Image: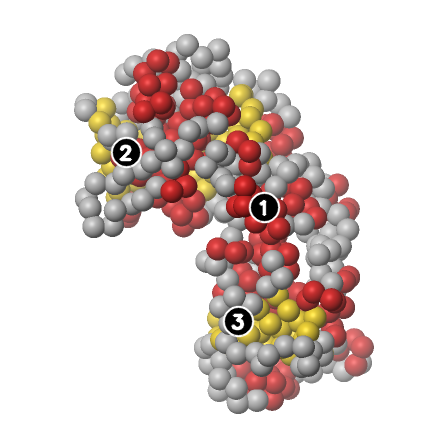
Amino acid sequence: MSNGHLSINKRINNLKVGLEKYKIQQRSKSSAFKFSPFSLKQRKVLTWWCDLSPMKDMEGIIADGAIRSGKTVSMSLSYGLWAMSNFDRQNFLICGKTIGSLRRNVVNLWRIMMSSEGYKIKEVRTDNLIIVNKGDAVNYFYLFGGKDEKSQDLVQGITAAGVLFDEVALMPESFINQATGRCSVEGSKFWFNCNPEGPSHWFKAKWIDRQKEKKLLYLHFTMNDNNSLAEEIKQRYCRMYSGVFYNRYIEGQWCVASGVIYDMFTKEKHVFNDDTTTPITGRRYYVIDYGTINPMVFLEIIDDGKNISIAKEYYYDSKKEQRQKTDREYAEDLVKFINGQSYRTVIIDPSAASFKAEMKSKGIRKVKDADNTVLDGIRKVSTLLNLNLLKVHESCTHTINEFNNYVWNEKSADRGVEEPVKQSDHALDCIRYFANTILSGRRSVRNE
């Protein structure tokens, strides 16, 4: 295999205009991919491993920074070209938080880019394997999801020549250690790609802050490093975030999450009454945060395809009322709360097994366990608020109060753990369940 600097630069120069404007001809067997001119930082990603590069002896690369800054495109393309230029009949790892997010954010586009460079792609979905070949060279790219501590077991036993991590800061340290430990082939390298998290995050402390010791090339990206991103699109992304999410996703800072979580929430922008809005129509959902000692909350949420309206709430605090209700009583209250209205789904805290059985006995159907992911759910709700797509009826006084009192746990942040203080969060947990469970595929709330 040859990895000549001039040949790779010639390839880069031959890739043509329009990365964001590429067209995949659905009816054609051939896949065309068009690139806008690469920025200087993207070119560094694409050429750092080449023979004439002063960085060629580095053992890996880290690209972090803002969203939509061109990191993923340049990193994944460079990883594929490096692997195919230097190895034959070797295993490579491509890792994301989940296989689904990895396919959506990296692999689908990567396959098109590699195909446009003349490589033949064959995917074996049952094995999460992509076979890439050109001429006599063939290599095997295995996909892995690193969502929790158990994920490290998935990569045990494989011998690899390289690993690419997409959104590495969202994966557990044990998974990263196991995957990098599998790269024992001579000449193997590590590729890390992520948006920033907190300054005490293990990846920053153990990889970014030790980049020289570990012989890693570190490149920090901003939106200006993506030549395909129009100015109006940059401004749209800026409007999507505020507070800690703006600092991380737009400015690319590894910063502390502190203070009020939903600091963008205001009564003027986000609270409505019956006199200031047209009648609410759309898909109706009922969302439940189950509580026995803690408050029990039901929210009626209406989604018209764009705007999300919290139409009414049920909030029972057994401590305040000095009486704890039974599951049967709560189920009866839920029947009254629904009041015969048609609805799409009832979304409930996945831990509430006994209450789900009681709901079933009362004839409540179409029940779905909520996605309880905390930080990603908070980000999605923040995006809705920033875009002014989430409204709360003035009668939902507990929900409004929680928006003003939901704060980051600063003691946890000192330990490198980001989490809210477990108070003033019951109605907000309902909204987070809804955003995670129903709105995950909606572009306006996805972290692109």
Q: Which residue is mark 2?
A: 116
Q: Quadrant of residue 5?
A: top left
Residue 76 vs 124, above or below: the answer is above
Q: Position of residue 194 (x, y in %)?
A: 54, 37
- First along the sequence among labels 2 and 1: 2
Q: Is 403 on the left or on the right of 23, as rendered?
A: right
- First along the sequence among labels 3 and 2: 2
Q: Which residue is mark 3?
A: 303
What amino acid is found at the position of numbered circle 1 in the picture?
Gln
Q: CA distance from mark 1 to mark 3?
A: 26 Å
Looking at the image, which residue is at 58% across and 74% down?
A: 301
Q: Secondary structure at mark 3?
A: strand
Looking at the image, which residue is at 52% across and 66% down?
A: 306
Mark 3, residues whose alpha carbon is within 10 Å: few (<14), some, or many (≥20)?
some
Q: Nearer the viewer, mark 1 or mark 3?
A: 1
The answer to whether any part of residue 332 appears in the image is no
Looking at the image, which residue is at 24% across and 30% down?
A: 118
Residue 135 vs 284, above or below: the answer is above
Q: Is 398 on the left or on the right of 331, as rendered?
A: right
Q: Position of residue 248 (x, y in %)?
A: 63, 41
Name the foreground residue: 87 vs 253: 253
Q: Secondary structure at mark 1?
A: helix
Q: Which residue is mark 1?
A: 235
What amino acid is found at the position of numbered circle 2 in the picture?
Ser
Looking at the image, which residue is at 34% across and 30% down?
A: 16
The answer to whether any part of residue 311 appears in the image is yes
Q: Nearer the viewer, mark 2 or mark 1?
A: 1
Name the foreground residue: 330 vs 311: 311
